[in-house]
Amino acid sequence: MTSFPSAAMASPRSVLARDKLMRTAERLYAEHGFASVSVTKIGEAAGQRNKSAVQYHFNNRDELIIAILERHMARIEKHRVAMVEALGAVGEVPLEERIRCHIQPNIEHHIELGTPSWYGRFLAQVIVEPNLREYAIQAHGKLPSVRRLDELGRVQWRDDDRALIAQHHEMIRQLTVHMCAEVEYDLAHGRIDPAAAEESWRRLGENLIQAICGLSVALLGNR
Amino acid sequence: MTSFPSAAMASPRSVLARDKLMRTAERLYAEHGFASVSVTKIGEAAGQRNKSAVQYHFNNRDELIIAILERHMARIEKHRVAMVEALGAVGEVPLEERIRCHIQPNIEHHIELGTPSWYGRFLAQVIVEPNLREYAIQAHGKLPSVRRLDELGRVQWRDDDRALIAQHHEMIRQLTVHMCAEVEYDLAHGRIDPAAAEESWRRLGENLIQAICGLSVALLGNR
């Protein structure tokens, strides 16, 4: 599969080049869309003289995108692990607390990224791209914090609810990803004042938690 | 902007060629993603000998995508207009009825399309693509049935709710588009039996209406 050596990854210079390529790719993808940005263009915009810089450092476009995704996921996971640990023992964790653990880590991450950011719009494209979505869903489902939240929720489920539970999970995922992208779009296009960015992210977080609690009770009852 | 004559659109042969290109593009985009499908590939797969068939019939990729989108929107709009007319006079239209008018026409359209279909996955990509999303949002907001539903809802709003109302609309839109794409993915990948397709679409419709009613009441109160 690999036609370039990956030993290059070790050197500090290579780490910097990879970082520059990832940041540049994320920005260009967010602003112009996956379809309008070639790996050659990313290399050029990242100031790489080697025309095959993306191939050299990431093998191909999909692996570049996955590397960007995993770096964000790792940072979000730190927030979520801390929140889930604070929930304490198995059993009666209220619905709202579990939902907050799904949503809030994304909000904290967006606030940390500052303005402008590109991750929200990048991620929205990843989860609708046929080649990448299955990977993204599975990687998210395997996160220790997400598995723990599933266990805490499962206490309250019946087995014949499986399809409904899956659809409910999907609704939470779609709402979270795409509503974060919306706020990022609004920031990028001047529809939200950058000075109000943190407040807008926090308000989105609270609205999402409230909305998803309502959605969940309507769909599943108070489980 | 146009470098090809559009007079060609009038002939029956040209209408057929356009139709073939639109169907082929929708399928290839749904299966492989916007980024992996060139207009040249679409022309070839549609059996066009002219290498610039897409340019000839649609000027460019974006106009091809918009033509596909508008054809579906027109069919969905017919369903929604009929439902909205049945609501009757201004005033007290219950929340659930208004939400049903937003959701159900999409469900009916998906059922009419049959299995396999590609529109759900195609649309999910359109509304996250930076070049196309503003167009798609505005075109949807201008539909007579959607404007009428907005008027019916507005009776119950206060002016200072504007930002929250906009976010609420966005949640409905994101959930509807992306959850329809999910069911289509599941059908395309054998996770739903094609014989159960209609039932799955109808169940999604009812789940969406129930979920969005819960979400709406939680976010806006019973307005």
Image (tube, coloured by chain):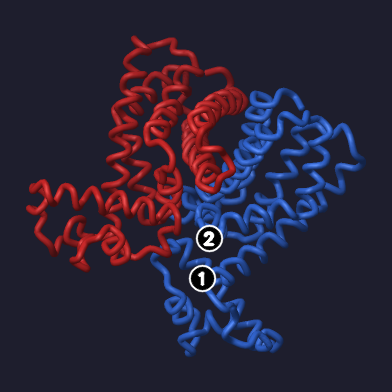
Chain colours: A red, B blue
Regarding mark 2 in the picture, which secondary structure is present there? helix
Give amino acid for label 1. Answer: Ala
Give amino acid for label 2. Answer: Asn
Identify whether A51 is placed above or below A97: below
Residue A26 pos. (x, y %):
35, 51
Residue B214 pos. (x, y %):
65, 27
Residue tagged 1? B25
Residue A1 pos. (x, y %):
17, 61
Residue drawn at x 59%, y 27% as measured from the top left: A211
Residue drawn at x 71%, y 34% as measured from the top left: B162
Residue tagged 2? B131
Q: Is A223 or B176 nearer to us in this picture?
A: B176
Q: Is A162 or B134 nearer to us in this picture?
A: B134
Left or right? Give the position of B215 relative to B101.
left
Residue B155 pos. (x, y %):
84, 33
Residue drawn at x 52%, y 42% as measured from the top left: A187
Few, some or many residues within 10 Å of mark 1 (<14, 14–19, 20+): many
Q: Chain of mark 1?
A: B
Residue drawn at x 40%, y 44% as measured from the top left: A119
